[in-house]
Image (cartoon, rainbow, N blue to C red):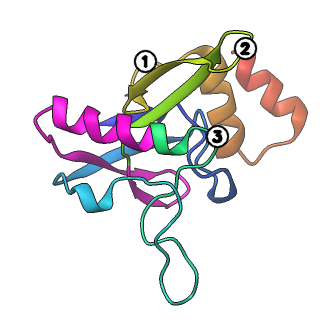
Amino acid sequence: MRVVLQANLEPDAGLVNGSQGSIVGFEPYDAKKLPTKPEGRDAAGIPTVAVLRGAHAKYAEQQIKAFGDRNNKQPWPIVKFDNGLVRTIFADCTANELGNEEPYSLLSRTQIPLIAGYAITIHKSQVRMKYLCEADKHTLTCLHRA
């Protein structure tokens, strides 16, 4: 099934909002592989699991674990993206502070950041066309208007 990524997971690797790919399988739930605040590293200094960053990383870690528990530890989708990368897509937690004074309230949403990619907007299809076509600017404009 074609899917579109709805979060900036690994910008350096090209996994950003709007990246397209196909689900190629599912990885069983394993609490040890869930994204965490960077603490565990291997001998080369590379994090041993997916890393959460930001002021609320520990909170996001707890929310992602709770998400998995609430969903009966369902398997996570494995996506092969159009740029060739294959990644397991875990839940993503977006947290925002509310209020003018500390302690702030946190508003958050935790979800798997994928949507079905078979019905995408015209803009996304034009961007996709741009990457797939090897054409000059004028030819590309004609393709978009056709």
Residue 80, quarter of the rendered image: bottom left
Compared to 127, does 102 lie above or below? above
* Label total for image: 3
Judging depth in this view, the residue of 123 and 138 nearest the camera is 123
- Disc 3 marks a residue whose amino acid type is Ala
Q: Position of residue 50 (x, y in %)?
A: 46, 59
Viewport quadrant of the N terminus? top left
Viewport quadrant of the C terminus? top right
Marks 2 and 3 in Cβ contact (< 8 Å)? no
Residue found at the far left of this picture: 72
* Residue visible at 62% across and 20% down in the picture: 103
Q: Residues within 10 Å of mark 1 (few under 14, many from 20)?
A: few
Q: Position of residue 145 (x, y in %)?
A: 74, 14
Residue designated by label 2: 101
Q: Is residue 115 visible?
A: yes
- Disc 1 marks a residue whose amino acid type is Ala
Q: Secondary structure at mark 2?
A: loop
Marks 1 and 2 in Cβ contact (< 8 Å)? no
Front of the two marks 1 and 2: 2
* Span colored in magenta: 60-88
* Residue visible at 79% across and 31% down in the picture: 140
Q: Secondary structure at mark 1?
A: loop
Residue designated by label 1: 119
Residue designated by label 3: 55
